[in-house]
Image: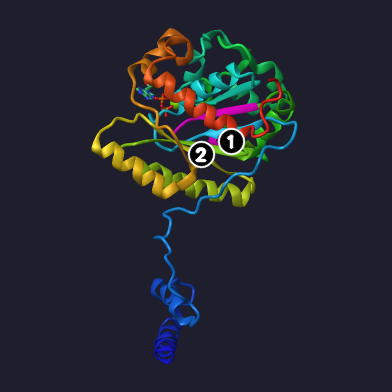
Amino acid sequence: MGEELNDSFSSRIDNSIDDHLIHDVSFVEIEHPLSSDITDTDAKPRRLFDIPHSLPTKQGLARIVTVTNQKGGVGKTTSVINIATHLAMRGARVLVVDCDAQGNCASGLGIDKSKTKITTKDVILTPSISIQARHATAVEGLHLIVGDHNLVGVEESLSAQLGRERRLVEALATLRPHYDLILIDTAPSMSIVSVNALTASDGILIPVQTEYLALEGVALLMGTIQEVRRLLNNSLGVDAVIMTMHSPTLLNTQVAGHLRETFGDLVLEPPIRRNIRLAESPSQGVPIQFHAPQSHGGQDYSLLSSELEALWFPGGLNNE
Ligand SMILES: Nc1ncnc2c1ncn2[C@@H]1O[C@H](COP(=O)(O)OP(=O)(O)O)[C@@H](O)[C@H]1O
Ligand SMILES: [Mg+2]
């Protein structure tokens, strides 16, 4: 058996000598049966993704977490606003950095962004002004650096700059000792601004809608995470996957099951149910905890945020 394989193996190599730089997929596949000491195990099917886990927060510094998914409308901004609010209400010092040009964190947290002077775009272009860029919000203990449409031009402004991926690292370095958590909201596209967010982060939170094709954007994101780890931030890892806009239909339940199979312990419970109160609270300028805390959305975000509190602050919050 071994000899047979060796023969077919060498003929493959001979045939491909001219094209020795081309990866032959069947060549790679045949490698494993060659080793004689492989025993049968009850191994599960291979994971779809190679998922790097994150490391614990460094002592005395805020945990920096980017909320991202390259798919739009999956509940990123809603999650940022409500998780940040819950943790601030628990006594954490929280800063939200809105890295999306849509700038929806501002209205969701009761801020009129047309009245703000210094925004995320300025912070990325001039990291030293990050301290002056913070705004108090409707929630005590929760501050915001406002994102707005000007972020669209950042890509061009930074194109010729050295170290353009590390602007946010620099900007947050001065703020980090003063917060427990810095939560970064991102746009669905993987722009230089999103790369800055990932480069500055300890962990990633991935909201995934429990709908058909839910994993499409996630596959893309995993590739991006690996690239950022390789080139810019080798301690970046996934903190958790959160299931959003969940309805009790068969399809949603199947997708939730698939997500749990794919991501294992990284999937946080409970899924956030689809709930009109969550959709309407930004128009009131307050998070769900103020608008309708007892609604399904309010309850789900509260439970989910408690899970995140345990994950991010295993020794408890300092201010308790
Ligand atoms: N669980 C939910 N139930 C109902 N509507 C939701 C829920 N989560 C988010 N929404 C609404 O869906 C839309 C997209 O959510 P958003 O958080 O802005 O997504 P993203 O930031 O990923 O683009 C918004 O109008 C938001 O209010
Ligand atoms: Mg958003």
Identified at 41% across, 10% down, the residue is 283
Tell me where residue 98 appears, x and y as whole percent.
Answer: 54, 24
Quadrant in the rendering for residue 182: top right
Tell me, yes or no, whether the highlighted magenta stretch contains residue 229.
Answer: no
Front one among 173 and 305: 305
Q: Where is mark 1, residue-wise?
A: 311
**Callout 1: helix, strand or loop?**
helix
Q: Quadrant of ligand 2?
A: top left
Q: Is residue 5 left or right of residue 249?
A: right
Name the residue located 51 percent from the left edge and 8 percent from the top edge.
112
Q: For the N terminus, which image quadrant?
A: bottom left
Residue that label 2 marks: 240
Question: Where is 47 relative to 30, above or below?
Answer: above
Residue range (magenta): 181-197
Q: Quadrant of residue 11?
A: bottom left
Crowd tier of the residue under label 2, counting other residues whose Cα lies within 10 Å: few below 14, some 14–19, many 20 or above: many
- Coordinates of residue 312 in the picture (x, y in percent): 61, 34
Q: Earlier in the sequence, mark 2 or mark 1?
A: 2
The count of marks equals: 2
Q: Amino acid at mark 2?
A: Ala
Q: Is residue 186 magenta?
A: yes
